[in-house]
Amino acid sequence: GGGGGEAEAAAGDGRSREQPSRLAKSQPRISYVDGRPPGPSLAERWRARHSELVAFRRRFGHYRVTRSVDGGAYRQLADWLCRQRREYVRHAAGNRSALDGERVRMLEG
């Protein structure tokens, strides 16, 4: 039956016209939950925040980071530091803590 032309020829030889290239087959297929690649790991974010704390110390000469310092520019750092202090107390008391020995040394150093 008549007139399929190219479509019949492609279907007749057993190959799909939508077949991916060989290059596409050799590359791993990556899918992300929200369509974006994952951001930095928790450990990377912790080290970055610690570096921000060290920079704060160099600038102001102390570790008294409050939410209102410098017009609120350090609000996230203040919140992070509050959590680290809470975890440090837990760690020092021998309780379960998000801080491991390396992080405690970094905070103490």
Image (tube, helix red, strand yellow):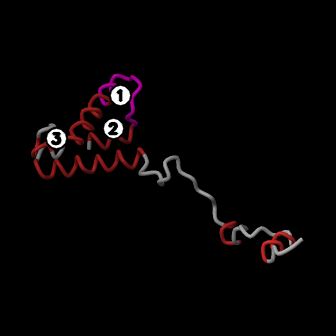
Lower sequence index among marks 1 and 3? 3
Location of residue 22 (image quadrant) = bottom right
Q: Secondary structure at mark 2?
A: helix
Which residue, given by chain and number where applicable, does mark 2 sit on?
104
Residue occupying the point 41% across, 46% down: 43
The residue nearer to you, when weighing 51 against 22, is 22
Please tell me whether mark 1 or mark 3 is closer to you in this view.
3
Compared to residue 103, the image places residue 11 above or below, namely below
In magenta, the rendered stretch is 88-100
Give the class, few, some or many, for how many residues have Cα within 10 Å of label 1's Cα (few <14, many ≥20).
some
Q: Is residue 21 magenta?
A: no
Res 103 → quadrant: top left
Q: Position of residue 37 (x, y in %)?
A: 48, 54
The residue most toward the right is 1
Q: Say left or right for 65 vs 11.
A: left
Q: What kind of residue is marked 2?
A: Val
The reply, left or right, for residue 38 in relation to residue 70 is right
| Identity, as a three-letter code, of the amino acid under mark 1 | His
- What residue would you read off at disc 1? 91
- Specify which label sits upstream in the sequence, 2 or 3: 3
